[in-house]
Image (spheres, rainbow, N blue to C red):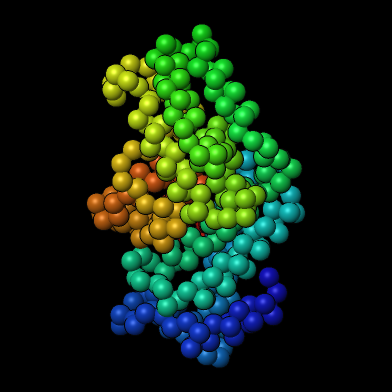
Amino acid sequence: MSEQPVTQAAQAARPGTATPPAPAAGSDDDRRWLVPLASTGPEHNRAVAELHRLLLRASAFEVRRRAAACGIADDAELDDIAQQAADDALLAVLARLDRFERRSRFTTWAYKFAIHTAGVAVRRRAWRERTLPPSSAEALGRLADLAQSPADSAETREQLTGILGAIARLTAHQRDVLLALAVDGVPIDVLADRLTTTRGALQDPARRAHAPARTARRPGGDDMTTPTPAVIAALLGPAGRQIGCDECFELLDAYVDQERSGRDADGETPGMRTHLAGCPACHEEYESLTALVALPEEQADA
């Protein structure tokens, strides 16, 4: 990133645009980040440049992890993705300084913007040449074949038959969203992009679809004697209270730092663990943020 865009970002975030929370005297976050970022002149510009370097380390870290998981070879485009993610994350952090609530360290809070932006970009890159099925008919056909497959246990086939009956009672939109995510394996942010919507907007139809599928999963109850295939687990979704993708993003930094400090993260952030169990994209961001904050800053780009 050139010095000019950093300077433009610094100017865009001058006091009056975003005011950070009142500092607790003497904290490291205040001395290193909040006070300089809220100031003007050279001190402000130095803090913005340092923040961008931090975010670039985070975005490059996530790009490497996500590209390896998606089977994408290292190339110049990935470097561009990391750079653009850091640039976008810088603008997002500067615009939201007044929303930093001190529930986590400032660096953990800032990292999550770079990780999210980079992860979304790499998943979209992985699916760039792939088209979504024109309808859910093909996925339904595969489920029907599984329900008749002698390779699966009678219990698994019974579950799939019940789930297929529940899916038939869904609306077309609920069915398409559920099968794209659970059977076709489309990442939720890729699906949101293709449907010109957001992660959060897709969660409601997915949740509404999970409920009847869980009800139909097994007439005899929950006592499982054979492992449930991954596709059934994805179709059922996680049971219990959970939050949505938007709330997960808002609370993720606090949750990770709570875990890191040995606190009861699940007790302090109810619904997070259940959501992470059912949302692969958010779980990837959680894993990356957890791994990144465990590294010294100088090792994050190693």
x and y percentages locating residue 266 in the rendered image: 28, 50
Q: Quadrant of residue 24?
A: bottom left
x and y percentages locating residue 225 in the rendered image: 33, 16
User: Taking 51 as reference, is 251 above or below it?
Assistant: above
User: In the image, 80: left or right of 50?
Assistant: right
Kindly give the residue lying farthest to the bottom in the view shown. Answer: 41
Callout count: 0
Please tell me which residue lies in front, 249 or 39: 249
Please tell me which residue lies in front, 122 or 137: 137
Q: Residue at x 41, y 52 (%)?
A: 244
User: Taking 35 as reference, is 283 above or below it?
Assistant: above
Residue 15 seen in render:
yes
Residue 32 seen in render:
no
x and y percentages locating residue 12 in the rendered image: 58, 83
Q: Residue at x 42, y 22 (%)?
A: 162
User: In the image, 190: left or right of 16?
Assistant: right
Q: Check the picture and name the quadrant holding the C terminus.
A: bottom right
x and y percentages locating residue 180 in the rendered image: 57, 38
User: Taking 266 as reference, is 51 above or below it?
Assistant: below
User: In the image, 52: left or right of 290?
Assistant: right
Q: Quadrant of residue 88?
A: bottom right
User: Taking 167 as reference, is 90 above or below it?
Assistant: below
Please tell me which residue lies in front, 249 or 77: 249
Q: Check the picture and name the quadrant holding the N terminus.
A: bottom right
Q: Residue at x 34, y 70 (%)?
A: 102
Q: Residue at x 38, y 25 (%)?
A: 217
Please tell me which residue lies in front, 114 or 180: 180
